[in-house]
Amino acid sequence: MVATARSAIGVFDSGIGGLTVVRALMERLPFEDIVYFGDTARVPYGVKSNDTIHNFTTQIADFLLDRDVKLLIIACNTMAAVAGDAVRARSPVPVLDVIDAGARAAVEISQRGIGVIGTPTTVNSNAYARNIHALNPALSVYSQACPLLVPLVEEGWLEHEVTKLTLQEYLKPVFVESIDALVLGCTHYPLLKPLIGQVAGAGIRLVDSAVTIAEQTARVLTEMDMHNPQRVAPRYDYVVTDIPLRFQTIGSRFLGRELSHLEQVRW
């Protein structure tokens, strides 16, 4: 089969963080079907070699392409940094990713400098800085790894004093620099946006990659004339490689609604 306007959008991540992207897509494109793939059996990807990340990422992309999705979204910063080009090279449909979307949005709003927070793997890849400098070499980029934020989000400590203190400590060296935009370079971080905004203050604009990629998806579908013409309730399918303890509880928190139509594949 060939993808049509009625085909689903494929979204994938190494775990559950990409559900924040799905949530943003649901809000921005309420009539689009979505298939989400979370590699919950092999998460985290950050400790794995680039070759392994490349192989896992292309395997998942092929799985979704076999489902005739009309567009692929890499909703994982690590996957995008390591294997984004490989996915694009093998995909017959457009491929979007959170790093490109976040970098473009940050460049549009920044006049001075851009801060980037993310996992150690994403920060060490320097992918955001490369993308930002490709768009505007004059902008300074200051990156900060925040390894404790993902477990705090998954624990549900979204407004906890410990989380606020952790953020203040991580962001201290970033705020010393002259920045006017801060990229939330991990798909877990949108859940912390109110708290990050509180710590950052009014002078720094936050770039939520989930929201920006939903906007980018809407533009691409318009350009391709591939918006779903049906105005009926869409179908959301969730495919995972493992169903770990508390998965549905945490997943529902990320999604902002109950997680249903769950399918497990064993590789």
Image (cartoon, helix red, strand yellow):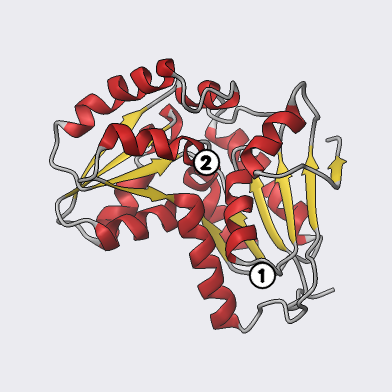
In the picture provided, is 232 more to the left or to the right than 73?
A: right
Location of mark 2 (residue) = 187
Query: Is residue 78 shown above or below 137?
Result: above
In the picture provided, is 37 more to the left or to the right than 206?
A: right
**Residue type highlighted by circle 1:** Pro
Location of mark 1 (residue) = 92
- Place residue 48 in its image quadrant: top right
Neighbour tally class for label 2: few under 14, some 14-19, many 20 plus, Cα within 10 Å: many
Between 161 and 243, the one nearer to me in the picture: 161
Q: x, y (%) of residue 16?
A: 65, 37
**Residue found at x 47% / y 45%:** 81
**Residue found at x 50% / y 59%:** 213
In the picture provided, is 151 more to the left or to the right than 267?
A: left
Q: x, y (%) of residue 202?
A: 24, 44
Mark 2 and mark 1 lie on one chain; the one further toward the N terminus is 1
Between 29 and 54, the one nearer to me in the picture: 29
Neighbour tally class for label 1: few under 14, some 14-19, many 20 plus, Cα within 10 Å: some
Query: Is residue 50 shown above or below 76?
Result: above
